[in-house]
Image (cartoon, rainbow, N blue to C red):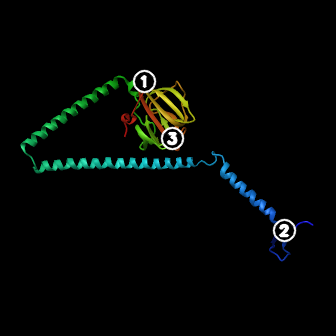
Amino acid sequence: MPKNRKRIQVQIYSKGTGKPKSYSIPLRIIGWWIFGLVIIVLGFMFWLPDNMINLKNFRIFEISKEQRAMQLTANKLEKQISEANSQIEGGRNLRNKIDKLAGISHKLKNEESELSKDFTDSEHIKKTLETLRKMRTALMEDEQYAKSLPLLHPVREHKNITNGFGMIHDPLTNRQLLHRGVDFAIKEGDTVIATGDGIIDAIINHKYGFGTSLEIQHSPRIKTIYSHLQNVLVQAGKPVKKGQAVAVAGKSGSVLWPVLHYEVHFDNQPINPEDYFITP
C-alpha cells in the first residue's frame, strides 16, 4: 500500500456564496520550494558579480560629494577672511588719519619718520607706474603678441575654482597630488573660449584621466590646455582668436561632476593661471 504522505490543505473562498475551492499540497513539495529559495538567495550573496554591486563606488561618490562641499566652504571662508582683512586695513588707515588730525603723538621724530616712509612709498609707486608704461608701450608696438597672451578666463562663470594650482588632496586615491592647473566648477554644456590668439596644436581623446582635451599654442613659449570637455568646436592646425568659442564643457575622463581643468605652460613648464587673469 502507498504511504500516506503529509499534506497541507488550502481552501480558497470566493466573494460570493459558492463552494470554496480546496487544494491539497504535499509537505514535501513545499519543502523543496523553500530549499530552492534558500539556494537562490545564497547564490546572490556569494556569487553576485562585482560589477553589479560595488560598495567602493558608492563610497567614492560620498567622498567626492564631501570633498566638493568642503572646497566650496573653504572658498567662502577665504572670501570672508579677505573682506575682513580689507575692513581691518581700512579701519587702521582711518584711525591713523584721525590720530593725525587730532594731534596725537605728533612728535617731530615721528613726523620725520612718516614723511620718510611716504617719500619711499611715492618712489616705489613711480617706479611701478614707469614699469607698467614700458610694458604697455611694448604690447602696443607688438599687437599680435599682445593678443596671443592668454589673459582671459576660459569660461564665463569663473568665480568658483574648486581646485587651485599646487598640491591638492585627491579623494579617489586619498593622496596629496601635484595639480598643474585650476579647476572651474561649471555646468555641463557651458562654452569654453580661447584665452588668447593661437593655433590649435592638438585634440586629445582619452577615456580616462583628463578625458577630451584641447591644446592651443599661443607663441613658441606659451601653451594652454583645456580638459574634461564634452566636445571640441575647432580643428587641429586651425587658428583661433581670443574670446572665440573652442569647446563645450563637460565631464569626460576621471571626474564625477562637470568641471573644466585649465593649464598654462611657459617653456613646457606649468605656471599658475590665476596670476595672469586680467579680469576679476
Answer yes or no: do the residues labelled 3 and 1 have beta carbons within 8 Å? no
Disc 2 element: strand
Q: Residue at x 23, y 50 (%)?
A: 91
Q: Residue at x 50, y 38 (%)?
A: 191
Asked if residue 59 shows in the view, the reply is: yes
Which residue is disc 1 drawn over? 219
The percent position of residue 96, horizontal first and vertical second, equals 17, 48
The percent position of residue 252, horizontal first and vertical second, equals 55, 38
Q: Residue furthest right?
A: 1
Which residue is disc 2 drawn over? 24
CA gap, disc 3 and disc 1? 27 Å
Which residue is disc 3 drawn over? 190
The percent position of residue 244, horizontal first and vertical second, equals 48, 32
Crowdedness near tag 1: few (<14), some (14–19) or many (≥20) residues, C-alpha within 10 Å: some
Residue 270's quadrant in the figure? top left
| Most foreground residue, 249 or 58 | 58
